[in-house]
Image (spheres, grey):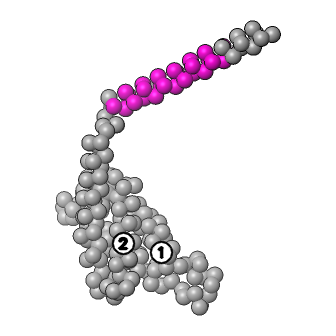
Amino acid sequence: GNDANQEDTENDAKQEDTENAQIEGTENDIKQEDTENGQIEGDAKSEDDFDADEFLLYEISKDVVRTHPDLQFFLDAVHGPARYESLKRVLFVYAKLNPGVKYVQGMNELLGALFYVLAAQSPQVSESEELSQLFSAQAAEADAFNCFTVLMGELRDVFVEDLDDSTTGIK
C-alpha cells in the first residue's frame, strides 16, 4: 500500500516538474520571439514611449490653452483650468487610441465646442434631480470624448495628411 502511494506521489511530482518546465520554456520562447521582433526592447523603448507621450501632451497643451478664448466658460478663474485639463485628457486619450490620426492642431477647437455645449448647458440640480444625473457637468468629459470620437470618425480624412487629397490643408 505505502509503496503504491509513494510511487503515485513521485509520478505526480515528476509530472508537475515536466509541466512547469514546459510553461517556463514557452515563456522563454515567447520572450525570445518578442525580442527578435523588436516588441520588447527593455527600458530604452519605454523611455522613448514616455518621451513621445510627453511631447504629445506638450503639443496638446499648447493648443488647448488657446481654445475658444472668446468664451468666459474657458477663461473662468475657478473652473477654467479644470475645463482645459478635461480637454487635454480627452485629446491625449483619443490620440493614443487612434495612432493613425494622433493629434492635429484644430481638434481642440472641435472638442472645445462639444465640451462647452455638454458642460455649460447641463441642467441645474434644482431643476430636476433626474435630468441632472443624466446630463451632469461631471459626465461632460466622457460625453465629449464619445461625441468627439464619433465626429472624428466622419472628419478624420481632414486631419490625416495621407488621406487629404486637397491642395490646401495640412500638407
Mark 1 is on which residue type? Ala
Instruction: Please report the residue visible at 41 percent of the width from the left and 75 percent of the height from the top.
Output: 114
**Residue, far front:** 2
Q: Which residue is mark 2?
A: 85
Task: Examine the structure image and report whether residue 77 is included in the region drawn in magenta.
Answer: no
**Residue, far right:** 1
Q: Residues within 10 Å of mark 1 (few under 14, many from 20)?
A: many
Q: Position of residue 49 (x, y in %)?
A: 29, 49
Dot 2 or dot 1: first in sequence order is 2
Whether residue 110 can be seen here: no
Label placed on residue 25: none
Task: Examine the structure image and report whether residue 22 is included in the region drawn in magenta.
Answer: yes
- Tell me: 29 left or right of 45: right
Q: Which residue is mark 1?
A: 140
Q: Secondary structure at mark 2?
A: helix
Instruction: Please report the residue visible at 34 percent of the width from the left and 78 percent of the height from the top.
Output: 81
The residue range painted magenta reads 11-35
Whether residue 125 can be seen here: yes
In this orientation, which residue lies closer to the viewer: 138 or 23?
Answer: 23
- Predominant SS along the magenta part: helix
In this orientation, which residue lies closer to the viewer: 136 or 23?
Answer: 23
Q: Is residue 27 above or below residue 76?
A: above
Instruction: Please report the residue visible at 47 percent of the width from the left and 66 percent of the height from the top.
Output: 146
Q: Position of residue 135 (x, y in %)?
A: 54, 78
Quarter holding the N terminus is: top right
Mark 2 is on which residue type? Glu
Q: Secondary structure at mark 1?
A: helix
Q: Position of residue 19 (x, y in %)?
A: 57, 21
Circle count: 2
Give yes or no for contact between labels 2 and 1 (Cβ–Cβ under 8 Å).
no
In this orientation, which residue lies closer to the viewer: 41 or 129?
Answer: 41
Instruction: Please report the residue visible at 30 percent of the width from the left and 80 percent of the height from the top.
Output: 68
